[in-house]
Structures are given as C-alpha cells and as structure tokens.
Amino acid sequence: MMELFAPTAFLLCAALFAFLLAINRFRLYNKLKEPNNNLCATENTCCGGINSLKCELPAGKLPTRMPTVLPSDEYAENVVPLSVNYHFTRKCNYKCGFCFHTAKTSFVLPLDDAKRGLELLKNAGMKKINFSGGEPFIVKKGAFVGELVKFCKQTLGVESVSIVSNGSLVSERWFEQYGEFLDILAVSCNSFDADTNEKIGRQQGQKSHLISLRSVRRLCADYKVAFKLNTVVNTHNKDENMVEEIMQLNPCRWKVFQCLLIDGENTGPDALRRAESFVITNAEFDEFLRRHNDVECLVPESNEKMQNSYLILDEYMRFLDCTKGAKEPSRSLLDVGVDNALNFSGFDEKMFFKRGGKNVWSKADMQLDW
Ligand code: SF4
C-alpha cells in the first residue's frame, strides 16, 4: 500500500504545482498587457516600470528580467529604430540652467547589459547610435563609452557611431584608444563668451569651456573623427553673433536648437532645473537663425521638430515618450524586447524623416577635409 501511495502523492503534488504556476503566469501576462501598470519586475527592485523614474537601483546592480511575453502590435511592426540616442548616464560635471536630461539617478547599466541591449537594437534595424548623457565621458573616465563605441563599430558593424559631449573631459588618450571606431563627436557650445557660458552654467570651476572646445576640435582633426557642434538658443545667447567662430571651427554640421521645457526635468515641481527664464520666443529663434544664415552647415531644429522625432533611451534602456511634455518611460527593452518597448516611445517617425534624421552619418561617406 505504501509503495503505491508515495508515487501517487508525488504526481498529485506535481500536477497541483504546475496548475498554480500556469495561473500565476496567466495573471502576470494580463497584468503586463495593461499599458499603464506600475509593475516592477520583482517586488524589491526597480526595473523600469512606467512610474519608476524616482526609484533608483544601486549602481552596478542589474534590474531583474521581466518575461518577454508581450505581442508586438502594428505600430512596432512598422517602426524601425533606425537611429537611437542612448543616454546611458544622467551625471554631468556642468550645471546648465536649461538642462533637459538632469541627474535624477546615478544609475549606469553594467557594460555587458548595455552591449546586450545594443545588439537587440542592431537586430531590430538600428543603423545609427548616438551616446549621450549627462556627460558620457564622466563614467569610468570615458572607458565605458569607449568600449560601447568600439563594440558598436567593430562587433556590430553599426553604420554610424557618435557621441554628444560637453567636451570638457575628453583626452588625447581616449582618441588613441577609441578614435578609429567613432564617426562623429558632437560638442555642445552655446556661446563664445566666457561670461555668458558662466551664466548658463556651462563650465566647471575655473576650467574654460572654450579651451576644451578648441582642444577637442584639434583632436577630431588629428584622429579623423567628424566634428559637430550643437547650440541651444536661450535668453543668454539669443543676441550673439557666432558666425566667425563657427566658420573657424568648421564643423561638419551645426545643430541649432530652441530651448525646450520638459516637465520633471527643467520645469515643474519634481524638476532639478528651472528653465523658464531661459525660454525664447519663436520670433527670437528665427532672428538668431537669420543672423547665421551664411553658415552653410547650420541645421535648425525648432521645438516642434525636436520634441518627438528622436528615439531616446534612458539609463535603464527604456524609451522616453515626450509627447505629453514630460518624459514617460517604457519598460526596459532588456526585459520586454525592442518591439514592445517601442510601442511606448511616442516616436514620430514621419517627423524624424522630415527633419532630415536620415542623412550622411558615417565618416567614411562624408568626404571631410578634417
Ligand atoms: S552639459 Fe549637457 S548634460 Fe551637462 S548640464 Fe549641460 S545640458 Fe545638462
């Protein structure tokens, strides 16, 4: 009798366990299908849930995986993440008053996880990756972004690999080690006047931003990396005439943005910056553009063009949806896959093409005289 009882009891227990497991998975599946749930991957860690911007994992600790169970819908099937901006850190050594990606967390993904996410994006059609921040060169003295740049170019064969930096932490040693893998280095420069830079918050201690900028320009020429400039037009620089200095620096492109308010970043009760006093009118932006009309490489980007036409990934590899004026994160693509995360990116693909998002973006195709 006992010989029969033991195997029967074991089989019954196994069946009961399987039944409970199936119910649990079914409940989790339904929960994940709700677009606005606040579910974290596990009870104790923040993994990229919709409302988890304020919770922070200790640096170096992995968000626990979320099962990849969500079906992609029509949107994700149609949208290809051709060009992606990965803001892998929010930390920065500058304090620009209008900053729209502020240091709300100090989290940075472990290098292997970041590489895994980049590989997923490449498999989904990514051809251009831009690393941004915060300040990308602040993490491991530039070695982190260097390894990602090398991985994307050498291992994944991504057509265009670029970085946006404030230029203050870039060294020649970095160029020696990683320069060959980088297509474009974009440096932000909002003024050629030291006092204006100080008013904007664009400097660290006594170190001159303009000296750093010119040093990076020389390094880009020496190591054959395309040099680009970005400027945010705001109340402090709107009347400046930058033509001469821009011509001297001779960037391959000069992107000119209009200062933008983002709820939770540079405006609103949760924000770390107050950018209201930096905002200019459309007419003032147009006037700045008119003054610099002779600069051929100038590419203007109004707020309307900019707001939803970038695919932005945050430090957890969550797409950020800016359509409602704040940055609403998707779940991490490391947990739910690229297609599902894309559903919550708010990306306006038509505007991406309209603003010239697809351009000559590999240094091999640029025919630069450096
Ligand atoms: S340099 Fe860029 S990331 Fe740093 S504070 Fe200024 S705008 Fe923000």
Image: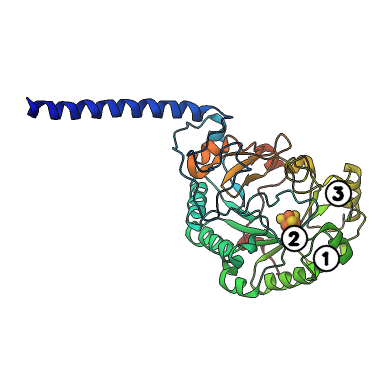
Q: Residues within 10 Å of mark 3 (few under 14, many from 20)?
A: many
- Asked which secondary structure carries label 2, the reply is loop
CB-based contact (under 8 Å), mark 2 and mark 3 = no
Residue 116 x %, y %? 47, 52
Kindly indicate whether the residue at mark 1 contacts the one at mark 2 (C-beta within 8 angstroms).
Answer: no
Q: Quadrant of residue 173?
A: bottom right
Q: Position of residue 257 (x, y in %)?
A: 79, 50
Which mark, by number, is residue 238? Answer: none
Image coordinates of residue 129 in percent, x first then y, are: 59, 53
Residue at x-position 14% and y-position 29% = 7
Above or below, 57 against 249 in this view is above
Residue carrying label 1: 247
| Disc 2 residue lies near ligand 1 with CB under 8 A | yes
Real-space Cα separation, disc 1 to disc 3, in angstroms = 26 Å
What's the distance in space between the residues labelled 2 and 3, CA to CA? 16 Å
**In terms of secondary structure, where does tag 1 sit?**
helix
Label 1 or label 3, whichever comes before in sequence order = 1
Instruction: For ligand 1, tell me if the residue under mark 3 lies within 8 Å.
Output: no
Q: Residue at x 50, y 41 (%)?
A: 44
Q: Is residue 288 left or right of residue 12?
A: right
Vertical side of 303 occupied by 208: above or below: below
Dividing the picture into quadrants, the one containing residue 178 is: bottom right
Label disc, if present, on residue 278 of the rendered structure: 3
In this rendering, the label closer to the viewer, 2 or 1: 2
Between residue 92 and residue 211, name the one nearer to us. Answer: 92
Q: Amino acid at mark 3?
A: Phe
Is 299 on the left or on the right of 114, as rendered?
right
Write down the residue under mark 2: 94
For label 2, count other residues whose C-alpha is less than 10 Å away and answer few (under 14), some (14-19) or many (20+): some
